[in-house]
Amino acid sequence: MTPEQRRRNRIAGIILAIIVIAIFAWTFVRGSALMN
Amino acid sequence: MSSVTADHVPASHGHDDHHEMPRGWRRWLFATNHKDIGTMYLIFSFLMLLEGGTLALLLRTELFEPGLQFFQPELFNQFTTMHGLIMIFGAIMPAFVGFANWMIPLQIGASDMAFARMNNFSFWLLPVGAILFTASFFVPGGATASGWTMYAPLSLQMGPGMDFAIFAVHILGASSIMGAINIIVTILNMRAPGMTLMKMPLFCWTWLITAYLLIAVMPVLAAAVTMLLTDRHFGTAFFNAAAGGDPVLYQHVFWFFGHPEVYIMILPAFGIVSAIVPAFARKPLFGYASMVYATAAIAILSFLVWAHHMFATGMPVTGQLYFMYATMLISIPTGVKIFNWVATMWRGSLTFETPMLFAIGFIFVFTLGGFTGLIVAVAPIDIAVHDTYYVVAHFHYVLVAGSLFALFGGAYYWLPKWTGRMYDERLGKWHFWSTMISFNVTFFPMHFLGLAGMPRRYVDYAAQFTDFHQIATIGAFWFGLSQILFMYVVLKAYAGRGEPAAAKPWEGAEGLEWTVPSPAPFHTFVTPPVVK
């Protein structure tokens, strides 16, 4: 694996992890909004 | 798939075999090699298949006769729930990730997965989840008995076994998410030069789309079960109607995960079948591009149909009409796939080795499951057969004859690459026919049971259902015993008993994985091949 590949992998991985956390948080927040 | 030829393939890989390969238990505990991790995934998922299968046989034993024979209703409900959870999260999903680990780097010409250490972590989370599931039987009140869907308010009233299940789902979900991130990044960033997306084998495509589905819906499940947890222990009232919450909200959130989950368990199966059929028809896959687009269409539609699981919950007629027609739309891209597999076989030089038998068996029996899916998509019919054995028959035709048959076919297809030995073809065929017949003996009568009004998840039943239940129980034990044959065939190949396998043991097979020796060396494609 080249350093450039490693860098691109890391960026892609972080973006996907942010998407996962955002979806989790959004579901929770929407659930809270409906609760009220 | 376009015909892929490698311009440069590292010759014998002999030099790759002896360095950097850890020995003993360290090789497995600290594994970062995609093949080792793939093997561990496959072994783990088979063990879970045995555990989930044992629970199923306990259920079928109790149901052999009306009345209570062996288990109290509470324990029966626990078996039902844990059978579903273990099969879905412990057996089917990890098995496909095992295939992905083994085959995706080999098929795209990558040296390994993008995040090798995270890959190790993803795997080692699985035994923790499995221990939580299994240990929950031994806590006060036993395992959760809420059904695999964990519907509120029942799940809010369960004992500590429910908390075990929630944590297990969290852990297995985290493992799946990490696996999905790894697969997406590997496919997008690690392909060999010349391996464009539209040259990738369809197995990689189906897994890429599946991984996106996982990224999108596993966090939703994680949030749903977290809300259950906070309702149970931290005073919130998301789903607790008595405190102002809404149990129907749980159903919506759960099925927003749950329906795409069905496709998470079937799209990689489509990829495996799309590898096997052209190899044994000795023809390129018919309509490669349309297969890719159909897979993407199925994935997109899977987000738009969740409430067809909730027709009986109650919804406006316009809602019923929308979810009914949207669900029926899925049959179009699925039909494209079935057509393309049949067209691939049309006028091909067909041979019927075990992988091909499982692939054809998959097409035939999965299509039956698809048809019953169309039937239950019709809201008025669904309201009549909701929570009956008709639904049990439907989803076992999709998940056993679909996912499991494809996994068996894929295992036989790539076993020579994994072990370096040809499996015992005669026993493989026995395994196929025994599995195929016993599967239908088990699940086909369930259609009749459901149409006659037999509810699912019931420990007891009226005497008129006895005959079909007894046939199903006999079939289930036959099916279970058939899998011992599979275990024997695989172990025999792993033990080195069998003809040595050539690098490309199947005449019609195509793809980079067949350019490396069998068994695949510990390191492959250290120098990326150039794909023409």
Image: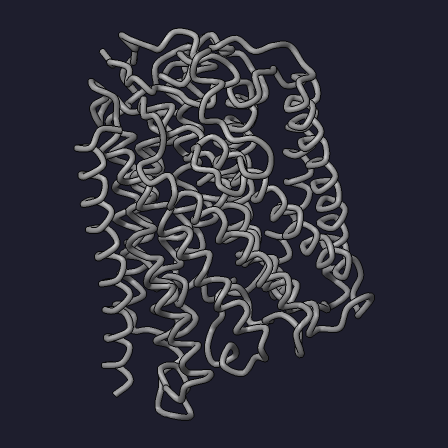
Splitting the image into 4 quarters, where does residue B381 fall?
bottom left
Residue projecting furthest to the right: B69
Q: Residue at x 49, y 19 (%)?
A: B18
Splitting the image into 4 quarters, where does residue B379 fall?
bottom left
Residue B70 in the image, given as x and y percentages of width and height: 81, 66
Residue B419 in the image, given as x and y percentages of width and height: 57, 21
Q: Is residue B307 left or right of residue B81?
A: left
Q: Nearer the viewer, residue B330 or B218?
A: B218
Q: Nearer the viewer, residue B320 or B398?
A: B398
Is residue B397 in sight in this rendering? yes
Q: Residue at x 59, y 71 (%)?
A: B144
B529, above or below B41, in the image: above
Residue A30 in the image, given as x and y percentages of width and height: 24, 75
Q: Residue at x 80, y 70 (%)?
A: B68
Q: Is residue B112 left or right of residue B496?
A: left
Q: Report the quarter where the C terminus of chain A lies.
A: bottom left
Look at the image and name its color scheme.
Answer: one colour
B259, above or below B190, in the image: below
Q: Nearer the viewer, residue A27 or B184?
A: B184
Is residue B429 in sight in this rendering? no
Q: Please tell me how many numbered marks the rendered image carries.
A: 0
Q: Residue at x 67, y 46 (%)?
A: B442
Q: Nearer the viewer, residue B87 or B357?
A: B87
Q: Is residue B436 left or right of residue A23?
A: right
Residue B463 in the image, given as x and y percentages of width and height: 77, 65
Q: Report the quarter where the N terminus of chain A lies.
A: top left
Residue projecting furthest to the bottom: B243
